[in-house]
Amino acid sequence: MKGIKTVLAGVVASVAACLMLVGGQQAASALSCPSGTPGEGKDVSNLAECSISENKDTLMGTVGKIINFALGVLGIVAVVFIIMGGVTYITSNGDAAKLTKAKNTIIYAVIGLVVALLAFAIVNFVISNVFNSSRSNSTTPTNTSSGTK
């Protein structure tokens, strides 16, 4: 059991290191603002300094990113539990209690993974379709005439 905890700690540390690398700052390079922006031709360290107003984050976009991140972490945890269940299954040496525990771990982890994937799909559908269509519907003009002369 101590070996499994060590492996799990190593996997969690590896995932955390990868997330820090992906989310970390990019190396500074010579960039210039694109044409049509307020700082056109200006040398900057990142494009955010160009004041490009087309890429606005909305509240729902931010909430969606947070939810997707949380669901991604849950998916990673489910995969780790599947691996742990597999290791327990392999190392059970025919012990019925360990076999049952390993099978239950794998089954529940797969159920959790399916739930996380479905939640990911539902959240993205709702954010992209429902909220974007309600915003576009509110800006379209409506016909207020009664249709009779």
Image (spheres, grey):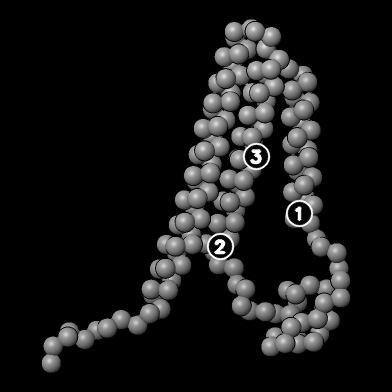
Question: Residue 131 sits in which quadrant?
Answer: bottom left
Residues tagged 1 and 3 counted as in contact (Cβ below 8 A): no
Provide residue 51's location: percent of width, then percent of height: 70, 80
Residue type, mark 1 in image:
Val
Type of the residue with mark 2: Gly
**Which element carries disc 2, helix, strand or loop?**
helix
Whole-percent x, y for residue 132 in the image: 46, 67
CA–CA distance in space, label 3 to label 2: 22 Å
Q: Which of marks 1 and 3 is nearer the N terminus?
A: 1
Whether 130 is drawn above or below 85: the answer is below
In three-dimensional space, the C-alpha distance between marks 2 and 1, rounded to whole angstroms, equals: 20 Å
Mark 3 lies on residue: 76
Q: What element carries label 3?
A: helix
N-term-proximal mark, 3 vs 2: 2
Rate crowding at label 2 as few (under 14), some (14 to 19) or many (20 or more) other CA atoms within 10 Å: some
**Mark 3 Cα-neighbour bin, 10 Å: few <14, some 14–19, many ≥20:** some
Residue at 56% from the left image edge and 51% from the top image edge: 67
Say above or below: 135 vs 51. Answer: above
The x, y position of residue 38, in whole percent, is 71, 87
Which residue shows up at 80% across the image and 87% down it? 41
Where does label 2 land, which residue?
61
